[in-house]
Amino acid sequence: MRRKFVAGNWKMNTLGQSAAELARALAQAWPRAKPQVEVAVCPPFPYLASVGAALAGSGIELGAQNVSHEKPGALTGEIAIEMLRDLGCRWVILGHSERRRLMGETDALISKKVTAALAGGVPAILCVGETLAQREAGQTWAVLDAQMQGSLAGVEAVAMNDVVIAYEPVWAIGTGVTATTAQAQSAHAHLRRWLSIRYNPDVAGQTRILYGGSVKPDNAQSLLGQPDVDGALVGGASLKAADFLAIVRAAESIINP
Ligand code: PEP
């Protein structure tokens, strides 16, 4: 069975004090790792160390929101995977639509980052998703296929143990508009079929596919209850401990009703 996974993407939010407070509140509420639900938070780079310290000993893992594909060296302003591992990062989010759209990240660059992350021993949460215009033009499957193909170029089946996919329709991110459960389920099923064809049925069966896009406490249970939705990547609602924990508990309640 695929373990449910709820990850919080704090994006470019919080300052030192609010990041530590949020992490402490989560750590208190989720003090031990549980076998059926995995939980992670991905704060901004400057707070990885303090959030990591606040989470120490709890059931919540640390993740980062980006990484360079280059080795440590002369590259001003970039962060290497070795540094994330050194800080205790268990995850790195790659290919987020904000980075694709606003920072010009291409599938080719994202695949280099995925390769660097996996080689550096930090599993990746790879984001894919279509824009509203692409959905309305009937291009959703073609867009997802191209992003998967390009971003996972060179990633062998055995390495897929360390990849989680996040389906994040761009039109649902930070907009308050959520995909319907049917839209989410059919996109996830499509991605799983893609994994089966590109890799094999085992990879398809074991790879976790998260949904992201305005997940909130009141819609989490129905989304996470879909057979191919293995968890959530949560933006805005991950900045409030109570809301994020409610989503985590919704994931737990699906397994232990
Ligand atoms: C995200 O950016 O990964 C995200 C899902 O954001 P939100 O939950 O705010 O839509």
Image: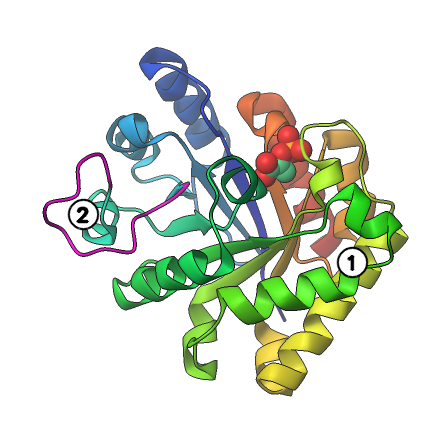
Viewer-closest of 191 and 5: 191
Q: Which quadrant of the frame does ligand 1 lie within?
A: top right
Q: Nearer the viewer, residue 111 or 164?
A: 111
The crowd level at tag 2 (other Cα within 10 Å; few <14, some 14-19, many 20+) is few
Q: Earlier in the sequence, mark 2 or mark 1?
A: 2
Local crowd at mark 1 within 10 Å, few (<14), some, or many (≥20)?
some
Whether residue 226 is visible, yes or no, is no
Cα distance in 3D space between marks 2 and 1:
38 Å
* Residue beneath disc 1: 140
Q: Amino acid at mark 1?
A: Thr
162 on left or right of 119: right
**Residue at 41% from the left image edge and 14% from the top image edge:** 18
First to last magenta residue range: 65-78
Residue in the foreground of this view, choosing between 223 and 125: 125
**Numbered mark located on residue 86 in the image:** 2
Vertical placement of residue 121 versus 83, above or below:
below
Is 19 located above or below residue 203 in the figure? above
| Identity of the residue drawn at 73% across and 45% down | 131
> For the stretch drawn in magenta, what is the main secondary structure?
loop
Q: Are marks 2 and 1 in contact (CB under 8 Å)?
A: no
Residue in the image at 80% along x and 53% along y: 184
Q: Residue at x 36, y 57 (%)?
A: 113
The answer to whether 40 is drawn above or below residue 203 in the figure is above
Q: Secondary structure at mark 2?
A: helix
* Residue type at the position of mark 2: Asp
